[in-house]
Image: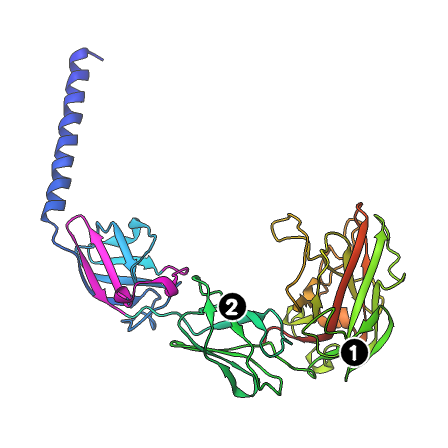
């Protein structure tokens, strides 16, 4: 190719680039300020309609004019991430941020949508509200009056009150975290019955599946009025050693348990219960993960190794391993509790043996595969599948029960 032709091609490319640049500048300069006229749902009919409000985690379509060049979008003053490929001059398809921290938002920016473009911005009044509270767990389901407890879940914003069984309400000293996933409250006086907990905020009421202060539902053994104890670790009712107790409780102890020691029957290492009803026969067709074994635990001495193995009727086919010193990210750390703490082990965590390791395989395919007729004994004991000696192990336990964790 001749030098002349190359120069001509380069010149044409330069001219094309300039024209494109001029066109872009003209497009931007001619575009007016953004306008929002309405917000609609993204789903097709029959839900393709004008919205009167929306909540975090919802996709919406913002409609109006001069929107194609949007560079920022805010909901309640909180920035949203977006894909500009979903924009046109008349609409923006965007996800309302699911992690919106309502507790820290500016009051004067609530219930607004703001769109910013190179030519200006527009603020549109539109209610953006979270769903009612959702309750997942309570740090101690048997906490006594005056005890500070943590409730985990979602949408814990602008809390008005927490209602305990019997309609006993706590209305003061309620503290939520910024993400609305946890709150702390002091257990009020006057709770005389068991039942669900309610969290009430300006957006609605969340009702727990779990039952607080319930000494009847699903209880296998509590060392007091429901006593199915068979043999193993000793018991105590000392409020000095383990304050906040509800009567008697068990104390599991062990020292000098070497690596590979599975002699669970020795000393105060096991808790073995007589037969009780885990799940009613009529409910055995429900999903395995809808139920959990729960108990309270109080750990004052650092627990750093060794495993609690849990099973039904001494049957090693399905074992649940409880190793509180193992963190979710795979690291390990000494474990203690501040007073009594509720342990929840879903029944789908009772697993088969895999690669020579108990409780690391697959969960049972059904409740009947795990529980048979639904009743039987319960066993929990300390073993040491590791290589490091368990020097000094001691935990207090109470209130063994199998209850629903999902409907």
| Secondary structure type for disc 1 | loop
Q: Please report the residue visible at 63 percent of the width from the left and 78 percent of the height from the top.
A: 144
Q: Residues within 10 Å of mark 1 (few under 14, many from 20)?
A: many
**Where does the image place residue 390, in percent across and percent down from the top left?**
80, 51
Based on the picture, tell me whether residue 255 belongs to the magenta stretch: no
Q: What is the basis of the colouring in this image? A: rainbow
On screen, residue 368 above or below 57: below
Q: On the image, numbered disc 2 is attached to which residue? A: 153
Q: Start and end of the magenta stretch?
A: 97-126
Pick the front one: 241 or 254: 241
Q: Which mark is residue 3?
A: none
Q: Mark 2, residues whose alpha carbon is within 10 Å: few (<14), some, or many (≥20)?
A: some
Give the position of the N terminus as an image quadrant: top left
Q: Quadrant of residue 348?
A: bottom right
What residue lies at 71% left-to-right and 78% top-to-bottom?
A: 246
- Residue at image point 68% right, 56% down: 335
Which quadrant, please, contains the C terminus? bottom right
| Outermost residue toward the top in this view | 2
At mark 2, the secondary structure is: strand
Residue 105 percent coordinates (x, y): 33, 62
Whether 7 is drawn above or below 196: the answer is above
Q: Which mark is residue 223?
A: 1
Residue 314 place in picture, x, y as percent:
85, 66
Whether residue 121 appears in magenta in the rendering, the answer is yes
């Amino acid at each position: 190719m001749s030098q002349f032709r190359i120069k001509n091609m380069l010149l044409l490319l330069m001219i094309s680039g300039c024209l494109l640049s001029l066109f872009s500048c003209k497009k931007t300069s001619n575009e007016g300020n953004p306008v929002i006229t309405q917000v609609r749902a993204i789903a097709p009919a029959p839900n393709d309609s004008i919205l009167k409000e929306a909540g975090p985690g919802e996709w919406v379509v913002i409609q109006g004019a001069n929107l194609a060049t949007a560079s920022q979008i805010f909901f309640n003053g909180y920035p949203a991430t977006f894909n500009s490929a979903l924009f046109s001059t008349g609409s923006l398809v965007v996800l309302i941020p699911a992690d919106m921290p309502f507790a820290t938002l500016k009051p004067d920016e609530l219930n607004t949508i703001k769109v910013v473009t190179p030519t200006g911005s527009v603020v549109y009044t539109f209610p953006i509200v979270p769903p009612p509270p959702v309750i997942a767990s309570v740090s101690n389901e048997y906490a006594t009056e005056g005890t500070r407890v943590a409730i985990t879940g979602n949408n814990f914003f602008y809390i008005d009150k927490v209602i305990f069984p019997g309609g006993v309400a706590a209305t003061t000293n309620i503290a939520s975290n910024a993400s609305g996933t946890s709150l702390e409250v002091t257990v009020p006086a006057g709770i005389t019955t068991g039942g669900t907990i309610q969290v009430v905020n300006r957006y609605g009421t969340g009702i727990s599946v779990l039952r607080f202060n319930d000494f009847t539902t699903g209880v296998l053994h509590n060392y007091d009025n429901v006593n199915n104890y068979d043999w193993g670790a000793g018991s105590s009712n000392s409020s000095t050693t383990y304050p906040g107790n509800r009567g008697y409780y068990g104390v599991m102890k062990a020292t000098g348990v070497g690596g590979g020691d599975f002699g669970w029957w020795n000393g105060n290492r096991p808790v073995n219960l007589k037969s009780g009803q885990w799940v009613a026969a009529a409910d055995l067709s429900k999903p395995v993960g809808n139920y959990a074994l729960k108990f309270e635990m109080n750990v004052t001495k650092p627990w750093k190794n060794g495993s609690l193995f849990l099973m039904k009727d001494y049957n090693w086919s399905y074992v649940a391993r409880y190793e509180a010193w193992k963190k979710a990210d795979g690291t390990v750390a000494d474990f203690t509790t501040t007073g009594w703490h509720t342990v929840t082990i879903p029944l789908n965590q009772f697993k088969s043996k895999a690669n020579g390791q108990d409780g690391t395989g697959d969960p049972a395919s059904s409740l009947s595969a795990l529980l048979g007729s639904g009743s039987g004994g319960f066993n929990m004991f300390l073993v040491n599948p590791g290589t490091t000696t368990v020097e000094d192990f001691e935990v207090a336990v109470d209130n063994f029960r199998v209850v629903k964790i999902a409907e």
